[in-house]
Amino acid sequence: MLSRDYVLELLSKVKDPQYEFPLLEMQFIRDVMVKDTRISLTVVCIELGQEYKEAVEQSVRAAFKIVEPIDLHIRFREPSEREMATVRQLLSPDEQREPTAEEIEQKGHAAGLENLSIIHPESGVRFIAVASGKGGVGKSTVTVNLATSLARLGKRVGIIDADIYGFSVPDMMGIEEYPEVEEGRIQPVERFGVKVMSMGFFIRENNPVIWRGPMLGRMLRQFFADVEWGELDYMLLDLPPGTGDVALDVHQMLPQSKEVLVTTPHATASFVAARAGAMAIQTNHDILGVVENMAYYQTRDGQKDYVFGRGGGGMLAENLHTELLAQIPLGAPDNLATDPDFSPSVYAEDTEIGQMYLELAQRVLEKYN
């Protein structure tokens, strides 16, 4: 009996016959189903000709020669406009290498919008990378609430959901629509006064992203280069946990960005988060401070129950020679799915935790300035 993981491993070797990129990495092999020796899958076709389809089918069947006999069913479909908009830059030969500073500037001028220059220090955009050492500490929750609070303070704010493997920002903010493409430019989705761009807009049915480092870097550059951000004061980047390829790419692309570290009070979470802080220091990025999330649980009688222990955030801030910006308790927004402003993770401004995030935003502004 074939396992799905083994089938995906075999499919990872199948390349586009024209562009030579791995089809599975580009999410152009979809809907893989495995039952005993029956395998079915869908291939998204960049080219619509019969010759192209035959070449792809031959490559797929060749990948399974070592496990024959099998019952293989291949479906083909055309790419959607959204899929083509996502991968167009990745398919361009010019995108197979890092652009020079001169090319970045020229491309921005050619677009008439200076889009790529958004990452240049003279653009005036202030970048805040929100990082953590491990997953599950509420980094994305802090990101969306900090961004929303900055917008409530009158700032023009954008979010790039740079956690490409674990994207969650659209769902957390209750975003149901998708970005549109106007005159070749991707328009970010705006929610609570915050402009948002995420890999989650381009992945259907919550499928996993199976990409390697270089492709992730190109996707991030596309978020900077091909999205019509307009005028921004602050751009928040929700980094993936840890110190992997995406975090390193962001640090290299944005030497002027500053960082907020998120941890829980637990000593282990604090210990792991210190590595993310050390990475920021080693790449000469200022740390604005530490947010201790899930700091305690407020009981109905007003007592604080320290579910995950105490002191982790303060210890992390002390070790990194920065300050503890906020201690956010365990909680969830008290709203209904039928509310027009519903979101699973954004707190209303007039709630106790909403006010804590507003104070956090004010502290971040003070520290950045």
Image (cartoon, helix red, strand yellow):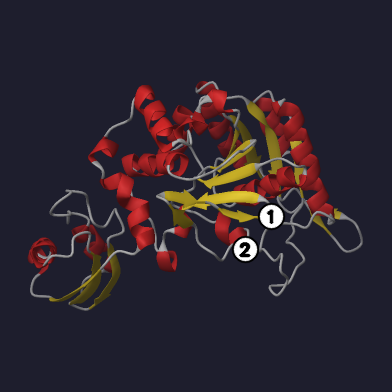
Q: Identify the residue at horizontal 22%, vertical 52% (top origin).
A: 22
Residue 212 vs residue 175: left or right?
A: left
Q: Amino acid at mark 1?
A: Phe
Question: Which residue bears the numbered disc 2?
Answer: 174
Question: Mark 1 Cα within 10 Å, few/some/many (few <14, many 20+)?
Answer: some
Q: Position of residue 28 (x, y in %)?
A: 27, 60
Residue 67 vs residue 356: left or right?
A: left
Q: Position of residue 225 (x, y in %)?
A: 43, 39
Q: Position of residue 291 (x, y in %)?
A: 70, 40
Visible in this render: residue 310?
A: no
**What is the secondary structure assignment of the residue under circle 2?**
loop
Q: Position of residue 311 (x, y in %)?
A: 74, 39
Out of 321 and 31, give the one closest to the viewer. Answer: 31
Figure check: 220 above or below 174: above
Out of 44 and 168, give the one closest to the viewer. Answer: 44
Nearer the observer, disc 2 or disc 1? 1
Question: Which residue bears the numbered disc 1?
Answer: 192
Q: Quadrant of the C terminus?
A: top right
Q: Amino acid at mark 2?
A: Gly
